[in-house]
Amino acid sequence: MNTHKREIQGVVVRKSGDKTASVLVTRQVLHPKYHKTVKRFKKYLVHDERNELNEGDTVIAVECRPLSKTKSFRLKTIVATGVK
């Protein structure tokens, strides 16, 4: 059994309905041809049980069982609060 759960850190860009927030995760990747560092972005839906997230917050989310068709991350901690 896999006990390691994937963790992501990103910024809340949208409150998407009840108990859900959209989190933008940024990572830096080396371009295969030009060998320059480029940014890559991906959005994840995160389950926020207590509706405590606001836009601009930096959060850490942990992988969990699928909670809906597109939502399989749960809020772990709020790292920093802030305005977008």
Image (spheres, helix red, strand yellow):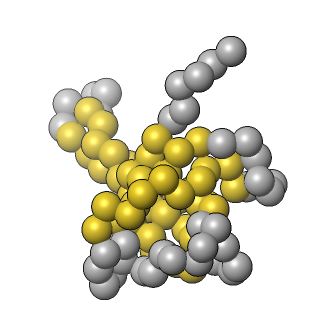
Question: Whole-percent x and y of residue 48?
Answer: 60, 67
Res 83 → quadrant: bottom left
Res 25 → quadrant: bottom left
* Observer-nearest of 21 and 42: 21
What is the residue that sits farthest to the bottom in this orientation?
Answer: 83
Is residue 25 visible in the rendered image? The answer is: no
Question: Whole-percent x and y of residue 53?
Answer: 48, 75
Image quarter of the C terminus: bottom left
Q: Is residue 7 left or right of residue 3?
A: left
What is the residue that sits farthest to the top in this orientation?
Answer: 1
Q: Is residue 55 left or right of residue 62?
A: left
Q: Is residue 36 left or right of residue 33?
A: left
* Observer-nearest of 34 and 77: 77
Question: Whole-percent x and y of residue 4?
Answer: 53, 25
* Observer-nearest of 48 and 56: 48
Instruction: Tell me the residue at 70%/55% (across/down).
Output: 71
Res 82 → quadrant: bottom left
Instruction: Tell me the residue at 20%/30% (across/down).
Output: 35
Question: Whole-percent x and y of residue 69?
Answer: 80, 54
Instruction: Tell me the residue at 43%/80% (across/down).
Output: 55
Residue 30, compared with residue 43, is above or below; it is above
Is residue 54 visible in the rendered image? The answer is: yes
What is the residue that sits farthest to the right in this orientation?
Answer: 69
Image quarter of the N terminus: top right
Residue 48, compared with residue 35, is above or below; it is below
